[in-house]
Image (spheres, grey):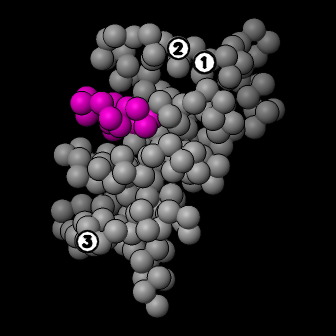
Amino acid sequence: MFTNEQRQEERTGRYGTPRLQYLQELVSQFQSSTDEETKEKIGANLANFAYDPYNYKFLRQLNVLELFLDCITEPNEKLVEFGAGGICNSCADPLNAAIVSQCGGIPLIVQCLSSPVRNTVNYALGSLYYLCNASNREEILKPEVIDLIRRYADAEAVSVSFSNLAKAFLDKHVRTSET
């Protein structure tokens, strides 16, 4: 469920931690941790916060979108998954999508299309659906990327979610530009 100021105040209570402060503590813990499992848990937690528009301004303020992109560059597949998930959850917002694009996130998301982790591929397809716009079409709609997405669209027997996300992407961004 999406949050608003009133609901957040009710949930936090008089002595609770304000959302910005709580997210700042998570980011600080993530950055200072050397334990992979701790980083995975915090990354997953931050990705969950990224789905709610109430948190978008906090995520931008704390550079969490950049943190998600950093996660995608890690060798740890769980961190890649949670980073891609956080990007996917947050980039439906045009401001967040612009930040991801400006920070070099598109090639990182495209790389996630080849991940061995199904969730990461789903997140990549969803992210590209929201990221693709007039200013970055050429970067995303490269022939090799379109070919891979078409193969996902045709792979309904392997994964219905891959197929559905890929078809939605193609319908919105490729088939409209071909006509």
In terms of secondary structure, what is the magenta stretch mainly?
helix
Q: Residues within 10 Å of mark 3 (few under 14, many from 20)?
A: few
Separation (CA) of disc 2 from disc 1: 6 Å
Locate residue 16: give its quadrant: top right
Rendering coords of residue 138 (x, y %): 43, 68
Label 1 amino acid?
Answer: Gln
Within the magenta stretch, is there residue 19?
A: no
Q: Residues within 10 Å of mark 1 (few under 14, many from 20)?
A: some
Q: Tags 2 and 1 in contact by the CB under 8 Å rule?
A: yes
Locate residue 20: give its quadrant: top right
Label 3 amino acid?
Answer: Asp
Task: From this view, report whether residue 178 is shown above or below residue 33.
Answer: below
Name the N-terminal-most of marks 3 and 1: 1
What is the residue that sits farthest to the bottom in this orientation? 179
Residue under numbered circle 3: 147
Magenta-tinted stretch: 68-83
Label 2 amino acid?
Answer: Ser
